[in-house]
Amino acid sequence: MKFVDEYRDPTAARALVAQITALCGDDQFKFMEVCGGHTHTIYRHGIEHVLPVNVELVHGPGCPVCVIPMGRVDDAIALAREPGIIFTTFGDMMRVPGSQGNLLTAKAEGADVRFVYSPLDALQIAIDNPDRQVVFFAVGFETTAPSTALTLLQAKAEDVANFTVFSNHVTIVPPLRAILESPDLRLDGFIGPGHVSTVVGQPPYRFVPSEYGLPLVTAGFEPLDILHAISMLLTQIREGRCEVENQYSRVVREEGNPRALAILAEVFELRPHFEWRGLGFIAQSGLKLRPEFAAFDAERRYQVPGVRVADPKACQCGEVLKGVIKPWECKVFGTACTPETPIGTCMVSSEGACAAYYTFGRMHRDAAVTLGRRRQLTP
Amino acid sequence: MCLGIPGQVKEFSELHEHLARVEVSGVTREVNIGLLEDEQLKLGDWVLIHVGFAMAKIDEEEATQALDLLKAMGEAYEDELEALRSSEYSSESGAT
């Protein structure tokens, strides 16, 4: 229990672990944490090591950087190479591999690629450079999409003519449904995402218990929050209940943020299909700009290649994102694919399961043995 | 990139209804509060900031806990803070 001593309230953590142990008894449970922030907490704080061995956590598709398919990165690079364009994006996107390099290599080859902290920074760059076209490569779930939407409303209000958005925003519910429909995986419940839920609230998750008979508990990001959510999931199962519950009520409200949802609906509409890395095409899972914002839509203003590119054969991000395999079970984990030279997206962002696993190195003994053996074999 | 960083509202902009100056880990910068328009934010309130926007109103205890957790993250938090500090939007030219 050495990790527990590092938690904010070790006594409470011990009590939760004891409760979880008593609740699960001899049965096996498999829960998926949807959110990349949770994945980070779980690895950073060694939560897998304090849980009883019969409670397994699998890591879901909730890292927005990890789910961007290669073809969209290639589209981004093609946009960045358009003459005269200033191409802006979040720092995490710079190293996401496309089929021919990434945005950093495009920058090294002369493209004007800049990383920004906020979409508002990208808009400011456009205002400061009226003779240049500025494209913002937008990624993220409903957590981030309202910020892009508000930036677009501001661009429209201020009539900024040289600013466009290449939208790769996605929504959280369709991939959950895709995972629930996947025959590869048997789950006993979900740890629901924290920050996304501040926007969407709890009602969108109700299909999980009502259609698939599984509990979902929205959780905060502290180790104690994760432990508490697991104990709430097990309590539901033991009491024969199956509901959406909110462990993170100190931040997440039942109805979410209606203002943010209204702004999202004003600016974006659902695409018929959007491709997800490892999950393939998912209907109504991506957001594009509404026709009223056509002037700000990079996909309408520029020729975007839009070519679908298959993931590299060696990369198993798809299986990792669906929770079918653990990061260390991927053939290239820690050898050909590392945070310095990622092959797959899960190794890029600190919220990606592979990068989190690699960085914190607190792996199960069998994982360490497998890796050690593989490293010896790799020249 | 999904980090939410707690900050405390210090001043509302007179020039732009959606802007406030918010103190984040000792640095004061402009934050867009347009997504919390219905919250009637007051000076001294705590908010969770994501990519330059306040995304949720939180209480002080939650802010303290969230900050402690972020500090424990080390590098990822330092990178986010650095990005926030160096953000062009926080410069005076971006204040309107």
Image (tube, helix red, strand yellow):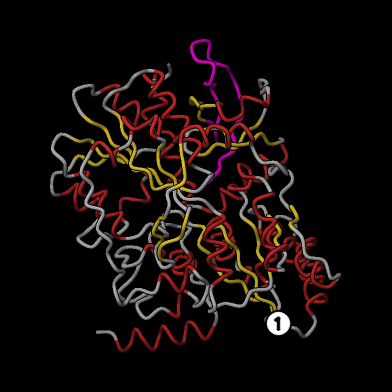
Identity of the residue furthest to the right in this view: A239
Q: Is residue A194 shown left or right of residue B51? A: right
Asked whether A159 falls inside the magenta stretch, the response is no
Span shown in magenta: B1-26
Q: Is residue A257 visible?
A: yes
Relative to the observer, which residue lies in front, A210 or B92? Answer: A210
Q: Quadrant of residue B10?
A: top right
Q: Is residue A355 shown left or right of residue A310? A: right
Q: Is residue B58 shown left or right of residue A334? A: right
Residue drawn at x 43%, y 23% as measured from the top left: A154
Disc 1 designates what residue? A28
Query: Is the N terminus of chain A in the top left, top right, bottom left or bottom right quadrant?
Result: bottom right
Residue drawn at x 16%, y 41% as measured from the top left: A82
Relative to the observer, which residue lies in front, A145 or A301? Answer: A301
Check disc 1 and give the amino acid type: Gln
Q: Which chain is mark 1 on? A: A
